[in-house]
Image (cartoon, helix red, strand yellow):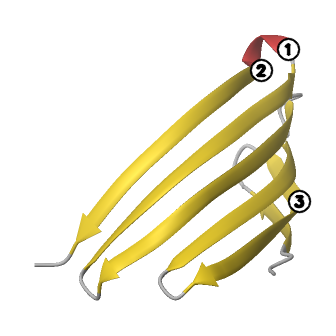
Amino acid sequence: VSLPVTFNRLDTTPDSRDESAWGAGGLWTWRFAPRTASFLGTGWEHDDTGDEQQNDYWVSVIGLARVFTPDAGALISYRYYQNDADPSDQSFRENRLNLRFSMKF
């Protein structure tokens, strides 16, 4: 189980634009077989870019990972990502299915 909390602040000079971001999230991983694990996570981040734009990012992910050999593995996951922005013309939603195979040579 992982429960990160973040806060970042960026103060820039010459244009005096201040940016800040904060958020929280959680990730739960369960190894239910010797080389297979599932994961479930969620998170939220708010940023204020200093130029009258604010964003709230929401993400959720669920997936499975499998190690075949010490040099090869695979992952399948689904991710939902949403940005609630102000102004609203910057808002979006994303549904993503990831299939990944990795191998070391």
CA–CA distance in space, label 1 to label 3: 20 Å
CA–CA distance in space, label 1 to label 2: 5 Å
Q: Is residue 35 above or below residue 95?
A: below
Residue at the far top: name it.
Answer: 89
Report whether 16 appears left or right of 75. right
Label 3 element class: strand
Label 2 element class: loop
Instruction: Tell me the number on the disc at residue 22.
Output: 3
Query: Where is residue 50 drawn, in percent x and y?
Result: 85, 40
- Mark with earlier residue (3, 2): 3
Label 1 element class: helix
Q: Is residue 69 above or below residue 7?
A: below
Q: Amino acid at mark 3?
A: Trp
Residue beneath disc 1: 88
Instruction: Tell me the number on the disc at residue 91.
Output: 2
In this view, the residue in front, 48 or 40, is 40
Q: Amino acid at mark 1?
A: Ser
Report whether 58 appears left or right of 39. right
Q: Residues within 10 Å of mark 1 (few under 14, many from 20)?
A: few
Residue contact at pointers 1 and 2, CB within 8 angstroms: yes
